[in-house]
Amino acid sequence: MADLFPDAPRRSRRVLMRVVDAGDHGCVTKYRYFVHLQCPLCGHDDGWSEHHTKRETLSQPCPKCNEVAHIEGGAA
Ligand SMILES: [Zn+2]
């Protein structure tokens, strides 16, 4: 799990959604990327969404995982 996004900043423990499918919805819009996002950790399925850049598709946080702040490291 740790090496999914090797260039992501290590200080952030946010769980990012993963692109499980990408395609073209056949419409011409200002959004170039149409992707299906799913969380690799909890399996939350965010469905299809449109984004301006590829980087944007890769930086969507999981709404479920990131609302829980005590995933690890909280019990020192
Ligand atoms: Zn999640």
Image (spheres, helix red, strand yellow):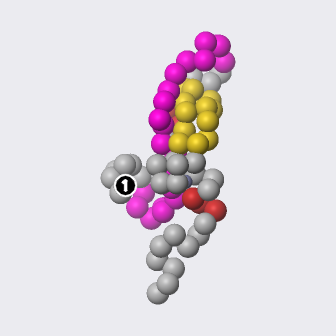
- In the rendered image, residue 73, in percent from the top left (x then y), is placed at 46, 77
**Which corner quadrant of the figure contains ligand 1?**
bottom right
Query: Magenta includes 18?
Result: yes
Q: Amino acid at mark 1?
A: Met
- In the rendered image, residue 16, in percent from the top left (x then y), is placed at 51, 50
- Image vertical order of residue 53 relative to residue 7, above or below: above
| Residue at left offset 55%, top offset 33% | 36
Given residues 23 and 52, the one toward you in this image is 23
Query: Magenta includes 44?
Result: no
- Image vertical order of residue 35 relative to residue 39, above or below: above
Considering the whole magenta stretch, tell me its main secondary structure.
loop
Given residues 13 and 67, the one toward you in this image is 67
Q: Quadrant of the N terminus?
A: bottom left
- Image vertical order of residue 13 relative to residue 47, above or below: below
- In the rendered image, residue 3, in percent from the top left (x then y), is placed at 33, 52
The answer to whether residue 20 is left or right of residue 45 is left
Given residues 9 and 3, the one toward you in this image is 3
Given residues 61 and 12, the one toward you in this image is 61
| Mark 1 surroundings within 10 Å by alpha-carbon count, few (fewer than 14), some (14 through 19), many (20 or more) | few
Q: Secondary structure at mark 1?
A: loop
The answer to whether residue 43 is left or right of residue 49 is left
Which segment is the magenta one? 9-29
| Residue at left offset 55%, top offset 18% | 24
The mark total stands at 1
Q: Is residue 20 visible?
A: yes
Which residue is the extreme one toward the front?
A: 43
Q: Is mark 1 within 8 Å of ligand 1?
A: no
| Residue at left offset 52%, top offset 54% | 42
| Residue at left offset 37%, top offset 49% | 4
- Residue occupied by mark 1: 1
